[in-house]
Amino acid sequence: MKSKIILIAMVASVAISCKGRQDSANQMEVKDSLSTSADSVMADSRGYIVAVGDLAPDFEIEYADGKKEMLSSLRGKVVMLQFTASWCGVCRKEMPFIEKDIWQKHKNNSSFALIGIDFKETPEVAAKFAKDIKITYPLTLDMDGAKFNLFCGPDAGVTRNIIINKEGRIIMLTRLYEEEEFAEMVKLIDAELLK
């Protein structure tokens, strides 16, 4: 009888031990699936992982002259972010229109900020690019692509414009250069600056 009790106790102990390990393994699986789903945010059909209405992700803007500021420090202004690169033909086509139709019109408006962001290029390449394309708005740096990846999935490309309202919310996202969409963006910026 005593050996039966010892045997039952041993079996119960093993069962409890195995159950604990299984629960622990299940918790690990749940934890892994949660972190995997958080790491792999799905991009929309145009490559964005943000949407109109979202609060713009904050990041440090790095100007060519060494000045740095947080995007959030521009709250109270209408902000246009333009992701670009010297090798991008569409960017080269669009940027003169940004210069002429947006920057030259609003560059002296203290309620507006236009930030060009050069994607994965050195300060020297970015400076030459700005000079070659004849833009005078600031072209800042994103040498590792981390700023771009706050807004877009890993396989997304430039050119992109992100318009942010005075409260820091995204109000327009563009992709490539289409005259009709560009005209809408110009009107939207004009209207936001009148608010």
Image (cartoon, rainbow, N blue to C red):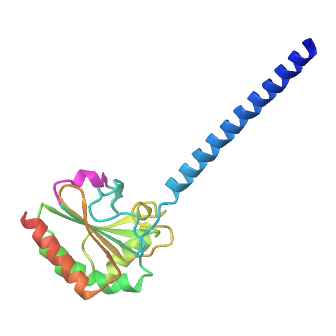
- Name the residue rendered at 22%, 55% in the picture: 74
**Percent coordinates x, y for residue 182 in the rendering:** 24, 81
Magenta range: 68-77
Residue at screen point 31% across, 52% down? 70
Foreground residue among 64 and 1: 1
Q: Quadrant of the N terminus?
A: top right
Q: Is residue 29 magenta?
A: no
The residue positioned 44% from the left and 75% from the top of the image is 157
The residue lying toward the viewer, choosing from 37 and 125, is 37
Q: Is residue 109 above or below residue 132?
A: above
- Residue 174 in percent (x, y) is at 31, 75
> Residue 130 is drawn in which quadrant?
bottom left
Q: Is residue 2 above or below residue 23?
A: above
Residue 187 pos. (x, y %): 14, 77
Q: Nearer the viewer, residue 95 or 158?
A: 158
Judged from this view, the residue extending furthest toward the front is 1
Q: Can residue 168 be seen in this snapshot? A: yes
Residue 108 in view (yes/no): no
> In the rendered structure, does residue 73 fall within the stretch colored magenta?
yes
Q: Residue at x 19, y 79 (%)?
A: 184
Question: Which quadrant is the C terminus positioned in?
Answer: bottom left
